[in-house]
């Protein structure tokens, strides 16, 4: 009598779960306010915190979060940090908050968050949680009136490559992986419970123009632009250092190859002489000779990250200048009238 | 969990003390909970006392950040089935001018029976410690509960919080929208004593300032609707902003026009009166 469409429980349990790809991150208004408050309180220091929520299909819901205390560099504080986390999770469980870690958030200063530590943290989280996301909040950009929330995750291809520790140029070309493919930005959706939206609708102030609009209307954007340019110049310096490393590598590689060729030539001449004299020819390879030792290729990860940072700064500068132009045109129109 | 037993206001009806001077004192406070009446001792002429002086408490104002309201609503939605309301601790600081700045909150599990209240004190202290690790400046400034008005159980809980902090602020958030709107009110308690006998705790309402600056920063459009499909980009934000400015300028323009027109009419009538005279 069983429906042919229904599968037995065993079959369902045995079937491989194919996880749908993550398409959108749904944040609650409460989480946004908490992150903003925490990051603003401690800015310019960089702070982090944990995200809690649910993983539902292709949507990752973030329903609550809690901040991490700022840790001084000390080994014994490591255990404290873990204890704090466990205690918070236990307490939140008691009041029916989702006890499931789905990622972490961190604040950043003008968008220089693409570092090797971020990748390391991602990999750490990925070992325990199937799907995790990192939310980056930039309080300095929010002072300009934009809401600088970004949800990031590492792309799968990059993760596989990183795990296999195989970061040479050839492998990257093989997988067609360039610096754009490291981080994937996921669109963010905001949701609120009906109760809170009722409250907010009521508590909304009467003026149509809010504080955020006033922030946006600030005519002076030069401090922001200056800092962006400063960071950009630093990044260019770092990039040139990396380029020099590569140049050095290639030069030494060619030099080594030239040395190998000359040694080989000498060997061949020697062998010819020995053949003429009737002796055994010497082998054409000599692994103990230092000129045959392969030179390690410098890792490309750092240069990829620097490229990411530069792209970010350029985008930010683009955005800010676009806005400044609109503001200036607005002021001009008002003056003309 | 300590179980504090106390009286329920419906148990002992009390009449107003008829001394005219004290009656004027009673009417000075603005609280609506005026059902607490005082039993008149037979021939005593003891004076009803308010203390510590109402002058000090009437200067207290409270400022609430929007995060607190969000947190309370979220906790209310997640409350266990048998609970009618949620209570919890308020964290913040006292500003130098005496205003209480309420910045954060966390809910504390509790059980309420007909005349008894049980509060999970250990949970409260654990959460407090955890929060202090992150931000040592945020200390307890009071407690909150959902629902409208102050009940007998609240008085007991308030007593507990009085032992934690000298003058706690009690915040009520009406999630039931009983008056047709979500009322958020803050109270401080004042002790009423007759002679040296503690009689009642009177909850006086204090002015409340809902500072929505952070919510404005995020944008009310995002916080108001139940779902927003994507965060607005900078350019879209500029567009909305310009529309708003336009509305504002139009309103001001109209207002000024109307004022000018009414001034003209007024002057016209004035001069016509003078001419007639």
Image (cartoon, coloured by chain):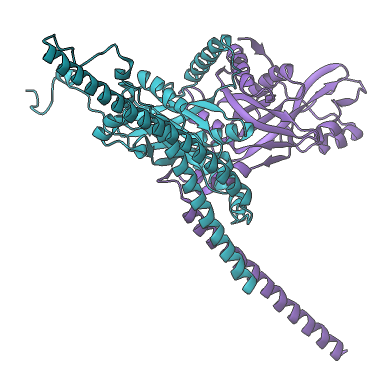
> At x 51% / y 23%, what residue is drawn?
B83
Whether residue A108 sits left or right of residue A5 in the image: it is right
**Horizontal placement of A254 versus B1: left or right?**
left
Nearest the viewer among A101 and A217 is: A217
Residue B111: x %, y % from top left: 55, 17
Foreground of the two, B201 or A139 = A139
What chain is colored purple?
B
Among the 4 quarters of the image, the one containing residue A330: bottom right
Residue situated furthest front in the rendering = A277
Please indicate, yes or no, whether residue A204 appears anywhere in the rendered image.
Answer: no
**Total marks drawn?**
0
Residue A161: x and y, percent?
Answer: 30, 26
In the picture, the quarter occupied by the N terminus of chain A is top left
Q: Quadrant of the C terminus of chain A?
A: bottom right
Taking the view exactly as shown, the residue that stands out farthest to the bottom is B275
- Specify whether residue B217 is in view: yes
Is A8 positioned to the left or the right of A298 in the image? left
Residue nearer the viewer, B117 or B220:
B220
Residue A200 x/y as whole percent: 55, 44
Instruction: Please report the residue visible at 34 percent of the width from the left and 22 percent of the height from the top.
Output: A295
* Image spot of residue B185 (x, y percent): 66, 37
Snapshot quadrant of residue B124: top right
According to the rendering, which colour does chain A have? cyan
Q: Nearer the viewer, residue B241 or B272?
A: B241
Tell me which residue sits at (60%, 22%) in the image: A70
In the image, residue A264 above or below residue A210:
above
Q: Could you tell me which residue is drawn at 82 percent across and 86 percent down?
A: B271
Decide: is A225 above or below A79: below
Q: Quadrant of residue A54?
A: top left
């Amino acid at each position: 009598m069983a429906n042919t469409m229904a599968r037995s429980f065993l079959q369902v349990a045995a079937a491989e779960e194919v996880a749908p790809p993550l398409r959108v991150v749904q944040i609650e208004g409460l989480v946004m306010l908490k992150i903003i408050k925490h990051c603003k309180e401690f800015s310019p220091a960089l702070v982090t915190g944990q995200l809690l929520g649910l993983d539902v299909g292709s949507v990752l819901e973030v329903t609550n979060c809690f901040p991490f205390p700022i840790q001084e560099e000390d080994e014994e504080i490591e255990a404290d940090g873990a204890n704090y986390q466990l205690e918070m999770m236990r307490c939140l469980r008691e009041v029916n908050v989702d006890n499931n870690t789905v990622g972490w958030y961190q604040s950043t200063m003008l968008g220089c968050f693409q570092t090797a530590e971020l990748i390391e943290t991602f990999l750490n989280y990925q070992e325990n949680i199937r799907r995790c996301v990192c939310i980056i909040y930039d309080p300095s950009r929010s002072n300009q009136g934009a809401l600088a929330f970004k949800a990031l995750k590492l792309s799968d291809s990059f993760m596989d490559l990183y795990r296999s520790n195989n970061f040479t140029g050839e492998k990257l070309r093989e997988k067609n992986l360039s610096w754009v493919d490291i981080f994937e930005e996921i669109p963010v959706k905001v949701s609120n419970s009906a109760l809170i939206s009722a409250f907010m609708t009521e508590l909304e102030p009467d003026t149509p123009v809010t504080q955020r609009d006033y922030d946006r209307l600030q005519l002076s954007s030069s401090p922001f632009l200056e800092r962006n340019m400063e960071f950009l110049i630093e990044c260019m310096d770092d990039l040139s250092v990396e380029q020099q490393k590569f140049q050095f590598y290639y030069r030494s590689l060619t030099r080594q190859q030239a040395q190998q060729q000359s040694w080989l030539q000498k060997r061949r001449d020697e062998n010819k002489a020995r053949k003429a004299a009737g002796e055994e020819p010497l082998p054409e390879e000599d692994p103990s000779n230092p000129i045959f030792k392969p030179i390690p290729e410098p890792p490309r990860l750092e240069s990829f990250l620097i490229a990411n940072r530069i792209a970010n700064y350029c985008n930010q500068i683009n955005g800010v200048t676009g806005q400044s132009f609109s503001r200036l045109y607005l002021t001009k129109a008002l003056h003309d009238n | 969990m300590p179980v504090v037993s106390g009286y329920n206001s419906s148990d002992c009806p009390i009449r107003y003390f008829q001394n005219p001077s004290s009656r004027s004192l009673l009417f000075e406070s603005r609280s609506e909970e005026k059902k607490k009446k005082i039993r008149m001792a037979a021939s005593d002429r003891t004076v009803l006392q308010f203390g510590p002086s109402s002058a000090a408490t009437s200067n207290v104002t409270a400022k609430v950040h929007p995060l607190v309201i969000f947190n309370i609503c979220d906790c209310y939605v997640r409350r266990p089935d048998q609970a009618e309301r949620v209570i919890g601790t308020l964290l913040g600081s006292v500003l130098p001018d005496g205003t209480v700045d309420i910045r954060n909150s966390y809910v504390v599990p509790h059980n309420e029976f007909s005349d008894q209240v049980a509060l999970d004190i250990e949970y409260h202290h654990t959460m407090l410690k955890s929060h202090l690790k992150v931000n040592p400046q945020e200390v307890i400034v009071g407690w909150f509960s959902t629902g409208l008005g102050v009940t007998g159980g609240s008085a007991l809980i308030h007593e507990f919080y009085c032992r934690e902090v000298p003058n706690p602020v009690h915040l009520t958030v009406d999630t039931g929208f009983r008056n047709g709107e979500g009322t958020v009110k803050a109270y401080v308690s004042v002790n009423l004593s007759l002679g040296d006998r503690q009689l009642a705790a009177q909850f006086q309402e204090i002015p409340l300032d809902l500072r929505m600056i952070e919510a404005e920063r995020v944008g009310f459009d995002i916080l108001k609707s139940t779902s927003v499909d994507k965060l607005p980009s900078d350019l879209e934000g500029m567009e909305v902003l310009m529309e708003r400015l336009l509305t504002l300028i139009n309103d001001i323009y109209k207002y000024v026009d109307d004022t000018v027109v009414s001034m003209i009419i007024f002057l016209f009538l004035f001069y016509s009166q003078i001419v007639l005279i």
